[in-house]
Image (spheres, rainbow, N blue to C red):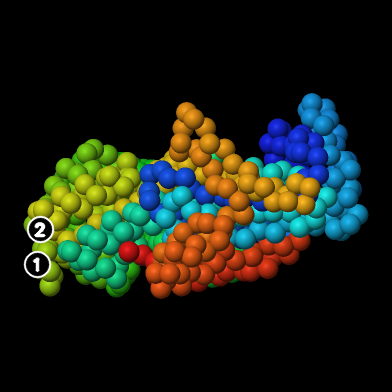
Amino acid sequence: MKTSIILNTDSYKVSMYCQYPFGTTGVYSYIESRGGRYDKTVFFGLQAFIKEYLLEQITQADIDFAAEILTAHGEPFNREGWEYILRVHNGYLPVVIRAVPEGTVVPVKNVLATIENTDPNCFWLTTWLETALLRAIWYPTTVATQSWHIKQVIKDFLEKTGDPSTINFKLHDFGARGVSSLESAGIGGAGHLVNFMGTDTISGVLFAREYYNAGIAGFSIPAAEHSTITSWGRENEVKAYENMVRQFGRAGSIVAVVSDSYDIFNAASKLWGEDLRQLVIDSGATVVIRPDSGDPVKVNLRLVEILGEKFGYTINNKGFKVLNNVRLIQGDGVNELTIRSILGAFMAMGWSADNIAFGMGGALLGAPQRDDQKFAMKASSACIAGEWRDVYKDPVTDSGKTSKKGRVELWESGGEFRSAVNCPASWVDKGIEWTPALKTVFENGKLVTEYSFQEIRYRAEKLTK
């Protein structure tokens, strides 16, 4: 269901137009991650929201419908204000949104985006848009942030034990079925693709293409599931595996086969390691064997030893073992801790991180919440009777919720970020040149700055620690 931006808000926002002090003509708000699980966030998703919801004019029909719904809902509707926007601004929203470039890695407790009205008669519009704008930022940014931090974990193990150039396909998105909607899969799936190129979430590929001018941003491979294996019957398990190799096994190709429908260790040692060993080798393909149950660390450690015995391995230039012809992918119960534990165990036993990839589902796209990174949008300044005043809260019961004051900006110098109203003289005195980091992306109905998916990826990778 798509509705106009008028109804894309919370009920309590509707009555705010008459709650501000008399003489209010401007409201300035900002969005930040106040802290949370990670100390840095990867900003992503705002452009898609702007293109989908803010470039379309509101109509009289939109206003009439909103009046009908909200009045019956029990809220006082600002018909006069919305009809003013229709009449004076031709239905386009008189606000300006400024934000850090998408893909930028920013330490928490810094301003990521700001919004304010550009018409003094529409001061109430800033907070009306809070619900939609905050939601548009917190979810894709949180997904991209988690994905980015996991990338650093995997890359660290690859640098110590294997080939870091393979990083882009080490975390595969299995999350499409674990989210609440097709739109969520698209938004979150694209957030993951900022950092990796492996995905089974087609809607994420389409999202990046639609809103960020990407080509095909993510890729996948033929893969078996339990139904296609078990439909052959337990007595024909080896034939099911053989069929996968014959159907998809070509020189240089990769094919993934779930192999724990019955006994994963028998499948690895006898069926793959003996019965099909020569077929796999002759095919020239890399067969990726997928366990799907049990303790991820114990199961994969045992499997890599079995496969090493059956297919052999080489020792890379870092002194770690790399399997011949086969690999593993763990797709059950995967999160950052699982990944750290498996790769740590592999390294301790002399196995390279090259031997395994990961598929992450619900924990990647379905589990993120706004409070993971403590996202908030707060008004920090209001123009009342011609004077800009600080607007903030400072609850005695929770200092972590103290909000910023004034027309706060984000300043940047050499990858370092600071949030402040003005560039403090003390920074300049230290010989550090700070420049404003927020760019105008939307103003009065127009997308002012547009980013391609390629430059977003480049920015996130460039700022990788």
Quadrant of the frame with the N terminus: top right
Q: Which residue is mark 2?
A: 350
Marks 1 and 2, Cα distance to the nearest angstrom? 8 Å
Which of the labelled discs sits on residue 319, or is there none? 1
Graded by Cα atoms within 10 Å as few (under 14), some (14 to 19) or many (20 or more), the crowding at tag 1 reads some
- Can you give x and y, in whole percent of width and height, for residue 179 in the image? 50, 42
Q: Quadrant of residue 439?
A: bottom right
Image spot of residue 57 (x, y percent): 81, 56
Residue 304 numbered mark, or none: none
The number of numbered discs placed on residues in the rendered structure image is 2
Q: Secondary structure at mark 1?
A: loop
Tell me whether circle 1 and circle 2 mark residues in contact (CB < 8 Å). Answer: yes
Question: Can the viewer see residue 284?
Answer: yes
Front residue of 216 and 415: 415
In the image, what residue occupies the spot 69% across and 44% down?
Answer: 127
Residue found 33% across the figure and 68% down from its top: 253
Can I make out residue 314 in this image? no
